[in-house]
Amino acid sequence: MLAMPLKNRLGRVLGVIELINARDDQGRPRDGGFTDEDQALIEHFASIATVALERTHLTESIIMRMIRMAEVHDPSETTPHVERVSGYAAILFEEWARRRGLEGANLERQRDRLRIAAKLHDVGKVGVSDRVLKKPGLLDEHERSEIERHVLIGGDLFDDMPTDYDEAAREVALMHHERWDGTGYPGILEGGQQRGRRGEEIPVFARIVAICDVFDALSSVRCYKPAWPEERVLDQMRTERGRAFDPELIDILFDRLAELRAIRAASPEEPD
Ligand SMILES: [Fe+2]
Ligand SMILES: [Fe+2]
């Protein structure tokens, strides 16, 4: 056996690589086990793997910090809320993708992209004024349009970045308030007229997050409403099937309700 810790520059162990049962070129068990040459090779590989792990940790912690920044500013976008939205979204996507024959590593990669993007759906709220965000009660037209700008600000945050994770985050941040029936925002300009994106013009990640965000907001306390009982939430989701929301995804939501409930139970709101 050859075991090697993956240590970062501070000496923290991030993981371990273990190789067992050395074999020769023909695949036969090799006398004497692993050699010094093997060890040098694995040391090199371990240093590359350590950098990759560190980058992943760093990306995750930067994302969580962005979310906490948005949370300081907007008390309704709490860490448990974004965790739940991300968890629900992964479940809806899995079923949607399974129905389309997507599986294995490809499915997992898409699901990971969505998980991250879902957590970032409202980070654009960092650009909306505090006074409007924290105002209890009804908003006037001007205040509402200021809040609606969070989708453009969020979309811009991920606009010029090169990875497909950024692309997913951009889609979701920009389009999670579009509606299946075309009456959402921000919409697109067509023939000099602004209109909402409709149906499958809205990318599936944004259609999924739209559902999960509303489902969770209705189930939770907001500064303008108490938490609704589940029955009322489900009634509302059913009413919006084919109006705000993709009908197939609403059917999936009802099919997978037990799993969504489990996520809700595992990630409750922090007591204040
Ligand atoms: Fe939003
Ligand atoms: Fe949200």
Image (cartoon, rainbow, N blue to C red):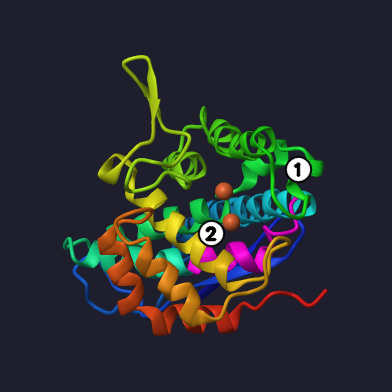
Q: Position of residue 72 (x, y in %)?
A: 79, 53
Q: Residues within 10 Å of mark 2 (few under 14, many from 20)?
A: some
Which amino acid type is marked by label 1?
A: Val
Q: Position of residue 165 (x, y in %)?
A: 46, 45
Q: Which residue is mark 2?
A: 46
Residue 1: in sight, yes or no?
no
The correct choice, above or below, for 12 with respect to 202 in the image is below
The quarter of the image holding the C terminus is: bottom right
Quarter of image, res 60: bottom right
Q: Nearer the viewer, mark 1 or mark 2?
A: 1
Quarter of image, res 8: bottom right
Mark 1 in CB contact with mark 2 (< 8 angstroms): no
Q: Determine which of the numbered discs, if any, sits on residue 124 in the image.
A: none
**In this image, 99 relative to 194: left or right?**
left
Q: Which residue is mark 1?
A: 132
Q: Secondary structure at mark 1?
A: helix
Q: Position of residue 210 (x, y in %)?
A: 45, 54
> In this picture, which residue range is highlighted in magenta?
74-87
Q: Residue 36 magenta-drawn?
A: no
Q: Main structural element of the magenta stretch: helix, strand or loop?
A: helix
N-term-proximal mark, 1 vs 2: 2
Residue 220: in sight, yes or no?
yes
Q: Position of residue 109 (x, y in %)?
A: 37, 57
Residue at (58, 64) in percent of width and height: 217
The correct choice, above or below, for 128 with respect to 244 in the image is above
Q: Secondary structure at mark 2?
A: helix
Rounded to the nearest whole Å, what is the CA distance between mark 1 and mark 2? 50 Å
Which amino acid type is marked by label 2?
A: Ala
